[in-house]
Image: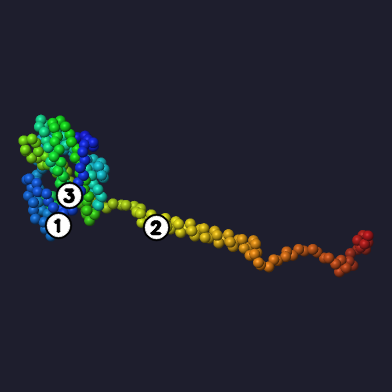
Amino acid sequence: MIELNFTDFVVRAQEDDTDDDVDVEGEETGVTDEGGEEEEAVEKPTGSPDADTIILFTKPAVAPGTNLELPAGDLVEFLVGFRNKGPEDFVLETLDASFRYPMDFNFYIQNFSTLAYERPVKPGQEATLSYSFIPAEAFAGRPFGLSINLRYRDLNGRQFYEGVYNETVNIVEIDEGLDGETFFLYVLLGACVVLLLVVGQQFLYSVGKKRVGGGGGGTTHKRHVETGTANHNDVDYEWLPKETLQSLSE
């Protein structure tokens, strides 16, 4: 395993909008059919026995041994580590990536830019190359073959073409969750609820004030208080005993 040095220079590739094939030595370019697929004879990767390569996906981060899932319409980044364990210098020339038909890697689905590095690597040294691309959103929910290839040479001019990654990957749709429009709608609904509460409170306060103050110009009703019988001459005392009447008259 090669330890990737993230401080080495980084080059990011942009998606090739023209989807044109890049002519490289040893590859045969086929004819594009009506569906946009391009058939090309796949060159068998032949790397140097004096070199080791490793790939590490940094966005999205993928644990070793798990299936690779790439987000449609989002940036994908990976690092390619190269170690020269031979006695001669190597020159890292190009790095390219493409989507292939998963059942037959001879058919191209989407090409990405081929980056030229021309980076020398001396014996016993290591180098790290960075590459990025964006899968098309229309590919969401479908599997594709991802082919990543590194081309390099030695000082004698011998060319080496090594397949760093050739596996089937799944293109998944991004779950964005709460977007800006939905968040704004929730904020607007919350403001409407608060406004209704304030209006209701003011209405209840005004109604209660009118009831307590009589409305400001209404008729004031006097409170009726029972005072009992004021005229004692209308009381019948005949049923009382004489002793009681005498005591009352005293």
Q: Residues within 10 Å of mark 1 (few under 14, many from 20)?
A: few
Q: Quadrant of the C terminus?
A: bottom right
Q: Amino acid at mark 2?
A: Leu
Residue 245: percent from left, percent from top: 92, 63
> Which residue corresponds to the image point at 10% horizontal and 30% vertical from the top-left?
87
Q: Nearer the viewer, residue 90 or 142?
A: 90
Residue drawn at point x = 14 percent, y = 34 percent: 121
Position in image of residue 219 (x %, y %): 68, 68
Say which label, 3 or 2, has the lower sequence index: 3
Q: Quadrant of residue 92?
A: top left
Mark 1 or mark 3: whose residue is earlier in sequence = 1
According to the picture, the residue beneath numbered tag 2 turns out to be 185
Q: Residues within 10 Å of mark 2 (few under 14, many from 20)?
A: few
Describe the element under mark 1 as helix, strand or loop.
loop
Q: Which residue is mark 3?
A: 112
From this view, report whether residue 70 is shown above or below residue 230: above
- Tell me how far mark 1 sits from mark 3, CA to CA: 14 Å
Please tell me the numbered disc located at residue 36.
1
Q: Nearer the viewer, mark 1 or mark 3?
A: 3
The amino acid type, in three-letter code, at marker 3 is Phe
Describe the element under mark 3 as helix, strand or loop: loop
